């Protein structure tokens, strides 16, 4: 079917076009939210602005990622593209070396100021949401490895897996998948290092924004017991995993049988499809059985809870224990003599009336979505293109603006119109917030557009149509509405 005729290339005379026609909406969004003003007010790195100011550099890196770039070197393609320069309203933009030099000017204090500027913009977006949005803020933290094979990057380290690189801490708002704080660290540092400090900053930010309840979630590394009493006094709810320490395992094994209950399904069943498809065969399990590999099969789950006082706390907290019955098989034979109980522990200060035992386990497992957030940030922000720890930290924070603009474009949609239109717009809003970064860029922003300059305005004339263009136009119409004070 693919049999093109003879192909010939020609250069247009006056027409200018860009591949990422959707970045005009991102520029309008940043203008509406006052991103430039907040950046310049928070960060002061230059004595003179000749010709660029701090916001120029930050927006330049973020727009490069939204326009199809993947690294600093792709800024060279942007600055040599006259149509792109006209599209962003610039005579010129910083080249890769200048952008790298800008990141190297940052110190820790200036990076914190920049994150504060982004969070002030974030609050403006939150104010546009309905009242139920402020019922509860769920703050999650986790560390991840940003690998690099370079030998001359200051601050790199090697982790227990033998991976070289940096180990940034990412604190996000789970409700919207926004990174509230990013802290770069050496690759051999533990996940929880400085986590309490950034948790406290995130709690204060959410409280100041108007959230009525704040919940902290994390895995076993973030079970910082020395902070539990303080968070409990501040009315901050938390759900953390706890290592299966020998004393906890002993308590679980000595619980009365009446304390255990069967753990029912964790997810609600989906509505049956009108045309259900036959289930596909599990080829991976078939290979495991045929080759006689050790196969672990989950046979059942039980839950129980007890009160426990950690060594660094002055009060007791609820500990939920999840017992997994795992059957070991090799081929078709079950290995009875090698089976051992598997326990998972979770600690929380949530009252049992508001959060039953089963719900604590479900909430703790929901934290796994943080891994998806981090994987998306690795598509745009979590990279190490520069030569030292602090400059790479600055780049991560600056590049996270691209992800933030993606999320804010969805949050700015306020469903209106008929009941059907409201339902469709609400679904589009949720879809945009949950959408992968590359999917958002390729589907929503990468629409070819002709750039037409007139006396008083800049026109993006879209050159083709596909269904995702409707979403782009929906975003554009909603971000132009007046903001709520």
Image (cartoon, rainbow, N blue to C red):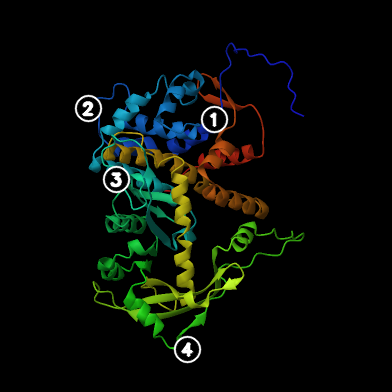
Q: CA distance from mark 2 to mark 3?
A: 35 Å
2 or 3: tag closer to the N-terminus:
2
**391 relative to 15, above or below:** below
Q: CA distance from mark 1 to mark 2?
A: 34 Å
Viewer-nearest residue: 173 or 103: 103
Image quadrant assignment for residue 292: bottom right
Front of the two marks 4 and 2: 4
1 or 2: tag closer to the N-terminus:
1
* Residue drawn at (50%, 46%) of the image: 412
4 or 1: tag closer to the N-terminus:
1
4 or 2: tag closer to the N-terminus:
2
> Percent from the top left, x then y, of residue 113?
28, 43
Tell me the number on the disc at residue 20. Answer: 1
Image quadrant assignment for residue 304: bottom left
Q: CA distance from mark 4 to mark 3?
A: 49 Å
Q: CA distance from mark 1 to mark 3?
A: 37 Å
Front of the two marks 4 and 3: 3
Q: Which residue is mark 2?
A: 47
Viewer-nearest residue: 176 or 292: 292
Front of the two marks 1 and 2: 1
């Amino acid at each position: 079917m693919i049999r093109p005729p003879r192909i010939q290339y020609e250069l247009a005379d006056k027409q200018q076009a860009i591949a990422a026609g959707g970045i005009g909406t991102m520029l309008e969004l940043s203008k509406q939210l006052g991103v430039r003003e907040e950046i310049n007010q928070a960060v002061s790195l230059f004595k003179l602005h000749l010709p660029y100011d701090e916001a120029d550099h930050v927006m330049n890196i973020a727009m490069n990622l939204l326009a199809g770039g993947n690294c600093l070197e792709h800024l060279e393609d942007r600055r040599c593209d006259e149509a792109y320069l006209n599209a962003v309203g610039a005579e010129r933009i910083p080249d890769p070396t200048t952008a790298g030099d800008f990141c190297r000017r940052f110190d820790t204090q200036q990076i914190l100021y920049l994150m504060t500027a982004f969070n002030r913009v974030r609050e403006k977006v939150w104010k546009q949401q309905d009242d139920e949005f402020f019922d509860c803020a769920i703050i999650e933290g986790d560390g991840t490895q940003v690998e690099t094979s370079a030998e001359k990057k200051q601050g790199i380290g090697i982790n227990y897996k033998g991976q070289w690189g940096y180990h940034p801490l990412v604190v996000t708002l789970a409700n919207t998948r926004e990174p509230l704080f990013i802290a770069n660290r050496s690759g051999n540092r533990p996940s929880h290092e400085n986590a309490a400090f950034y948790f406290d900053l995130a709690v204060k930010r959410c409280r100041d924004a108007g959230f009525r309840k704040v919940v902290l979630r994390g895995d076993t590394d973030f079970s910082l017991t020395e902070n539990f009493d303080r968070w409990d006094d501040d009315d901050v709810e938390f759900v953390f995993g706890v290592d299966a320490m020998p004393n906890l395992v002993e308590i679980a094994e000595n619980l009365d049988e009446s304390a255990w209950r069967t753990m029912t399904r964790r997810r609600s069943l989906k509505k049956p499809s009108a045309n259900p498809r036959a289930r596909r065969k599990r080829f991976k399990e078939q290979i495991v059985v045929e080759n006689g590999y050790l196969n672990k099969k989950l046979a059942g789950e039980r839950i129980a809870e007890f009160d426990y006082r950690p060594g660094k706390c002055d009060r007791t907290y609820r500990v939920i224990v999840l017992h997994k019955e795992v059957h070991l098989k090799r081929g078709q034979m079950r290995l009875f003599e090698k089976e051992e109980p598997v326990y998972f522990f979770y600690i929380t200060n949530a009252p049992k009336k508001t959060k039953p035992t089963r719900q604590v386990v479900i909430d703790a497992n929901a934290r796994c979505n943080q891994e998806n957030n981090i994987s998306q940030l690795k598509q745009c922000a979590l990279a190490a293109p520069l030569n030292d720890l602090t400059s790479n930290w600055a780049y991560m924070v600056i590049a996270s603006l691209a992800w933030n603009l993606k999320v804010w474009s969805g949050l700015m949609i306020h469903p209106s119109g008929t009941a059907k239109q409201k339902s469709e717009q609400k679904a589009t809003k949720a879809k945009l917030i949950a959408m992968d970064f590359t999917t958002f860029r390729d589907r929503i922003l990468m629409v070819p557009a002709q750039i037409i300059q007139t006396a008083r305005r800049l026109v993006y004339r879209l050159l083709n149509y596909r269904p995702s263009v409707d979403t782009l136009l929906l975003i554009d119409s909603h971000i132009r509405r007046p903001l709520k004070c």
